[in-house]
Amino acid sequence: MEIFWSLPYLAFIIWLIPRIPFFRKSGISAVGLRIIFSIKALMGIALILVYKYYYPPGSADIFNYFTDGKVLFSALSINPYDYFSMLTGIGDDAPHLMHYYDKMNFWLKDFNYNLFNDNKTVIRFNALVMLFSFKNIYVHAYIMNFLSFIGLVGMFRFLLQVVKANKWVALLVVVLPPSLLFWGSGLLKEGIVIFALGMLLHALALIDKHRLSLKPYITLILALAIFSISKFYVLMAILPAILSYYLAKATGKNWMSFLSVHLFLLLAIFLLPMAGLPDIPELISRKQNDFINYVQSLNHVGSYIDSPRLTSNFWDFITQGFRGLFITLFRPHPLEAHNLAMIPAVIENLITMVLIFLAFIFHKRKINRRAMLFLGSFTLILFALAGMTTPVLGALVRYKIPAQPFLYGLLLLSIDWKKAEKLIKKWFPHINQAQKTLNEHLFNEVQK
């Protein structure tokens, strides 16, 4: 019945989307926009149902965030000032609010590392949406999907305008990667991250056109503000690509620009502590060690992978970074599909292996190197960070999804498909005959 009562909200959003200028100017037809959002909404419903009926009670982040949102929302009828205080973060450390926090699962973290607790962002999102959702969790999923859909369309427009990708390739990589479609459609942090990333890239695409309007800069500030209360490391992962891209654009030296910027930033993060600034390698190693300790304290985690403990040593970071990249690219493999949620990740890893093979064998000579380096930089850094800090495959498949459109875009745009088609037909001549037979059959049918 909850799904039934949520359908008017879904119908309204589907009706509204093509009427919003941002979507209308995206280059995707109204029908296409509605179909894509409807698929995402169905995935959001499916994820809720999978967690509801397949996983043990209390193990799903979706329901924990939603329940915590209810606790925060309950303050509205008791003391509206407390509600708005917790919602905005202004004065939310007041002692009398602890009786709310004590009832929540995720508001307080055991390990914060002096960073913003991004659990609060999703809890506040739920408490805000409850003003009009009647506490229907499916409505919350639709609103989160609307935000992530904005992000995906922003990525699509960036790939078209800056990377100069083919329209269908750009659409394919932002819509169909299995983990992105499944986990990116849930009532989770990833929806907010995708929204922020898409808005950031869309703003850069507008600025890249040298528009003198304030709009792209306002969009950029909004994206940065959202990153500050969400997964900030995603912004840090894409920052080298952004800086390198604009340096390469200014100098015309693509490889030199990307190598110099990345090398400088890599050395800089290890030299920051000497200037009394935050020790980023130490923070990352602590996060990884605490994650391992937490998982090992649990009775059983089926997708746990034995990981060497990370230190803040420079060479340890380099070697563990390569290991993390390999893990993120190729795991879980088919033998590690222990549950239903792992199947999309296994499928996409197999697809990744095939595409890497094709890109190596049928590499395209004429490519937009600056754009390809941008895509590769973000993908490599985010995948390496996720793989080196996450000892649980179930979490890893979620953490890598912001970079998936860029990985698949990089691979698809690097393949010379005409060369691949010629070679495949040469190796398998019966394909030519089958194609000719099919064409003759279709021609005869048309004549009839």
Image: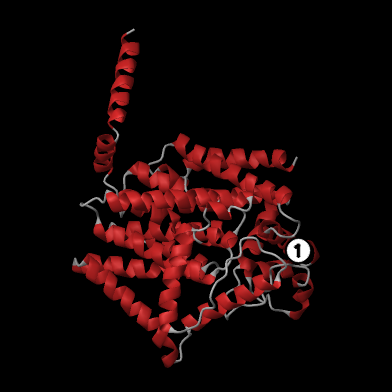
Residue shown at 44% from the left, 45% from the top: 23
Tell me the amino acid under the disc marked 1. Answer: Val
In the image, taking residue 433 as reference, residue 62 lies left or right, namely: right
Q: Is residue 380 above or below residue 206?
A: below
Q: Is residue 271 above or below residue 350?
A: below
In the image, taking residue 306 as reference, residue 106 lies left or right, namely: right
Q: In this view of the protein, can residue 132 be seen by the observer?
A: yes
Q: Quadrant of the C terminus?
A: top left
Q: Quadrant of residue 329?
A: bottom left
Residue shown at 51% from the left, 37% from the top: 35
Mark 1 is surrounded, within 10 Å at the Cα level, by few (under 14), some (14 to 19) or many (20 or more) other residues, namely some
Residue 277: give x, y in percent of width and height. 46, 87
Residue under numbered circle 1: 71
Residue 446 or residue 174, whichever sits in front: 446
Residue 446: give x, y in percent of width and height. 33, 12
- Indicate the secondary structure of the residue bearing disc 1: helix
State the scheme by which the image is colored: secondary structure
